[in-house]
Image: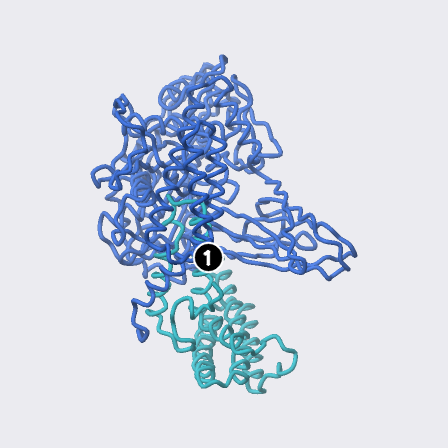
Chain colours: A cyan, B blue
């Protein structure tokens, strides 16, 4: 079972991936391997089924999420995202992050849900654009540039989660 | 009455022989057993035609036990020994049990689960649950006239590992082969989805006697996918009773109650709650043993107000589950109500308001879980034709983590991960020659160890002597399709599988189970020994058949010498099964299983590739 996630699902190894195709492949693999199919089978089949179904779940989660899919493609192509070099971020990107952080802190302090919502939308937009750009780089074989895009996406993802968490806290207080 | 058996059960080789499997709803208040007969799921009734078995066990001084209605009848007379709602105590310690001081039982906190001192001795909640499950098993075998191949047991989706393990242990002790632990909301969705041919995204709101679950499920043709699940495994109809009970005491200004009077008033509170589901007002009258009297009237509106906070808790949990699923309330196509407590009008109103739609209540909320479990049991036992089946993708409800420095918990597997799932982590040693490591596994969403459920402490032993930091120990956490955790570890440099000693923080060790099984079967009980032998023979026959058909399909996957090995193992099983040594049969069966694992893996690989190559590659939506 030394296949990568794309091979497991018999899908082309690239960023552009139809959601329906991925879902269909995932369901098909689970149909064949889920432990429920082997509930009345022998111990050997049960063990193998659990390994395969676990693997299918891991592969599906990795490929379904654009960020983890992009990161995975970088890894498959030998680009290490953890390298210390090349962690420099473009100035414009950093400026945007700082502006957003300030807006976030202000919105939190004021309990301003509407402001948080606006922030959420802005981050979502930036994430979509970055995903598209990174995806194009990956599918064109420019993995080093793509890796930088992935690092920016990680930033955006973390920030997006912080905003969502803050939103939750405000909502709970209502 | 059991039918006269003409042939050895399970020995028929007819491939169309239906395998008898049941679904069991082991509830806080009532338990039920159901099966699929002639393609229709139906509940199995007792001799008096009743489907519900009260989840009550009464212990007698002579060591005997009464289960169900017979036990319930004496609850107010013998509250200390009449154990109800045992589901609330499975996998729990004393401090987990809310209002324990108001319960009439004599609790004993123990390093495993809490224990209860009864007239028949100290009982573990697992043993008490076993009585209920064994009663249902007997009922099923009597009704169906043959041994069961297995059972699907339902559990609240929000049950953690300790509670699940305890449930599985109780079922094993009751002599049931557990095909699957199935989450209650998912079981309801199965009954509902197949019944109504529904597609879409649904919320299942399941408020039982002692537990609350909210599950968000996506139903598409042939696939039930749980998107998120939440709840409270210590919140249910019982708590509404308890609130009313407290109100009665206040209003009637009663002196501290005896156990019998408390039991009587709790029963009155429950009765009033149920009446207020169909009436606007009810009277609460009681004559206490203490001589005091209670004469109160209560309106449905007042009851709704005094229990508003409980309903609010369920709404908060629903909100959280929706957020986890990434959905808004109005994106839900329908809300299904499950559990007797959802009959309360103010509960239905609150949920209807929150989701913005009238909750669906057309399925009997008391029966739907057992029926869904029966449908799934029928599938898992292998009674359905391929292609006529469905896929159930469920999730783990609570994050799993390990203890790190400073009493903090680091999450290893996040909640709502689709199961089965696994995660590996690497550790190293911090002292030269360190040969062991301690790992503490917990479950929960909080950051502090003290706020999470302790599942088990592992001692990894046998790490080969190395310099500090040189060892690479990979610990793998595997959650299976029942939502249960297993941990394995391996030192990568040397390849040594570090042996793990699991000390479950709550629950019975394998030794405990073995002891209890031995005790229940008794040394001189020939009948039970015969049964055990027959079970091993049936299992051996099953494996022989399964291996034969696997070879018939995919023998080409084995090299000649590999085939020779498998044939020898098959012969060993046949030889052992012809004898009367149950242990020898099991050993041969285990050897065959181990010896065909590689073959099973190759077959799996082949079937997956075949299934996927049947699709077109360019299916970009």
Between B466 and B166, the residue placed more toward the observer is: B466
Q: Quadrant of the N terminus of chain B?
A: top left
**With respect to residue B452, does B262 lie above or below?**
above
Q: Which residue is mark 1?
A: A54
Position of residue B268 in the picture relative to residue B105 (left or right): left
Quadrant position of residue B405: bottom right
| Residue B165 location (% of width, % of height) | 50, 40
| Residue B532 location (% of width, % of height) | 43, 28
Position of residue B108 in the picture relative to residue B62 (left or right): right
- Looking at the image, which residue sits at the far top? B62
User: Which chain contains the residue that carries disc 1?
Assistant: A
| Residue B176 location (% of width, % of height) | 41, 33
Residue B248 visible, this angle:
no
| Residue B19 location (% of width, % of height) | 30, 38
**With respect to residue B414, does B525 lie above or below?**
above
Between B134 and A157, the residue placed more toward the observer is: B134
């Amino acid at each position: 079972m030394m296949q990568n996630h794309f091979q497991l699902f018999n899908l082309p190894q690239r960023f552009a991936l139809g959601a329906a195709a991925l879902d269909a492949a995932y369901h098909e693999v689970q149909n064949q391997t889920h432990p429920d199919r082997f509930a009345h089978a022998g111990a050997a089949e049960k063990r193998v089924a659990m390994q395969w179904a676990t693997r299918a779940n891991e592969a599906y989660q990795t490929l379904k999420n654009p960020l983890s899919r992009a990161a995975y493609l970088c890894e498959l192509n030998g680009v290490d995202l953890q390298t210390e070099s090349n962690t420099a971020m473009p100035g414009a990107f950093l400026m945007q992050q700082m502006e957003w952080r300030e807006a976030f802190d202000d919105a939190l302090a004021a309990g301003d849900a509407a402001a948080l919502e606006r922030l959420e939308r802005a981050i979502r937009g930036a994430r979509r654009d970055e995903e598209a750009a990174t995806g194009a780089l990956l599918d064109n074989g420019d993995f080093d540039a793509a890796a930088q895009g992935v690092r920016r996406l990680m930033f955006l993802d973390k920030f997006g989660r912080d905003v969502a968490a803050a939103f939750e806290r405000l909502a709970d207080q209502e | 009455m059991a039918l006269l058996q003409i042939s050895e059960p399970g020995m028929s080789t007819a491939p169309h022989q239906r395998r008898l499997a049941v679904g069991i709803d082991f509830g806080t208040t009532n338990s039920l057993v159901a099966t699929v007969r002639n393609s229709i799921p139906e509940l199995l009734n007792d001799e008096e035609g009743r489907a519900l078995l009260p989840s009550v066990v009464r212990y007698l001084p002579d060591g005997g036990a009464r289960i169900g209605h017979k036990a319930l009848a004496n609850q107010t007379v013998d509250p200390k020994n009449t154990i109800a709602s045992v589901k609330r105590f499975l996998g729990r310690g004393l401090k987990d049990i809310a209002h324990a001081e108001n319960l009439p039982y004599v609790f004993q906190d123990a390093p495993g689960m809490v224990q209860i001192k009864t007239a028949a001795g100290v009982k573990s909640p697992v043993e008490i649950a076993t009585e209920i499950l064994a009663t249902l098993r007997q009922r099923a075998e009597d009704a169906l006239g043959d041994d069961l191949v297995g059972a699907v047991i339902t559990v609240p989706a929000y049950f953690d590992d300790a509670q699940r393990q305890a449930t599985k242990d109780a079922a094993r002790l009751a002599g049931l082969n557990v095909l699957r632990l199935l989450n209650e909301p998912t079981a309801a969705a199965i009954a509902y989805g197949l019944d109504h041919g529904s597609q879409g995204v649904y919320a299942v709101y399941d408020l039982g006697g002692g537990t609350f679950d909210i599950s968000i499920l996506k139903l598409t043709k042939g696939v039930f996918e749980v998107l998120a699940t939440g709840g409270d495994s210590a919140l249910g109809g019982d708590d509404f009773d308890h609130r009313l009970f407290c109100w009665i005491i206040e209003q009637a200004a009663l002196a501290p109650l005896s156990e019998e009077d408390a039991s009587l008033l709790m029963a009155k509170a429950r009765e009033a709650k149920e009446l207020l589901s169909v009436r606007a007002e009810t009277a609460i009258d009681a004559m206490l043993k203490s001589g005091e009297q209670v004469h109160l009237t209560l309106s449905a509106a007042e009851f709704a107000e005094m229990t508003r906070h409980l309903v609010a808790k369920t709404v908060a949990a629903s909100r959280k589950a929706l957020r986890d699923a990434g959905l808004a309330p109005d994106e839900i196509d329908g809300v299904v109500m499950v559990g007797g407590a959802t009959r309360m009008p103010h509960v239905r109103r609150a949920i209807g308001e929150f989701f913005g739609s009238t909750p669906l209540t057309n399925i009997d909320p008391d029966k739907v879980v057992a029926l869904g479990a029966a449908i799934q049991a029928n599938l898992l036992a292998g009674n359905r034709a391929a292609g006529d089946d469905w896929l159930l993708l469920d999730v783990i409800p609570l994050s799993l983590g390990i203890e790190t420095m400073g009493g903090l918990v680091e999450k290893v597997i996040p909640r709502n991960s689709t199961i089965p799932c696994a995660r590996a982590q690497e550790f190293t040693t911090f002292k030269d020659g360190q040969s062991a490591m301690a790992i503490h596994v917990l479950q929960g969403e909080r950051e502090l160890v003290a706020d999470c459920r302790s599942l088990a402490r592992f001692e990894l032993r046998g790490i080969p002597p190395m310099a500090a930091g040189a060892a690479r120990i990979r610990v793998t956490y595997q959650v299976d399709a029942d939502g249960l955790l297993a941990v394995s570890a391996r030192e990568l440099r040397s390849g040594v599988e570090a042996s793990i000693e699991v000390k479950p923080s709550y629950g019975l060790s394998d030794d405990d189970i073995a002891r209890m099984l031995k005790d229940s079967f008794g040394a001189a009980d020939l009948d039970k020994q015969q049964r055990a032998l027959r079970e091993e023979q049936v299992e051996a026959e099953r494996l022989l058949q399964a291996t034969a058909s696997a070879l018939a399909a995919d023998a080409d996957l084995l090299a000649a010498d590999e085939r020779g090995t498998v044939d020898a193992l098959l012969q060993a099983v046949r030889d052992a099964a012809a004898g009367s040594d149950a242990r020898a049969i099991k050993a041969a069966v285990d050897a065959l299983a181990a010896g065909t694992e590689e073959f099973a893996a190759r077959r799996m690989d082949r079937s997956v590739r075949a299934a996927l190559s049947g699709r077109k590659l360019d299916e970009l939506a």
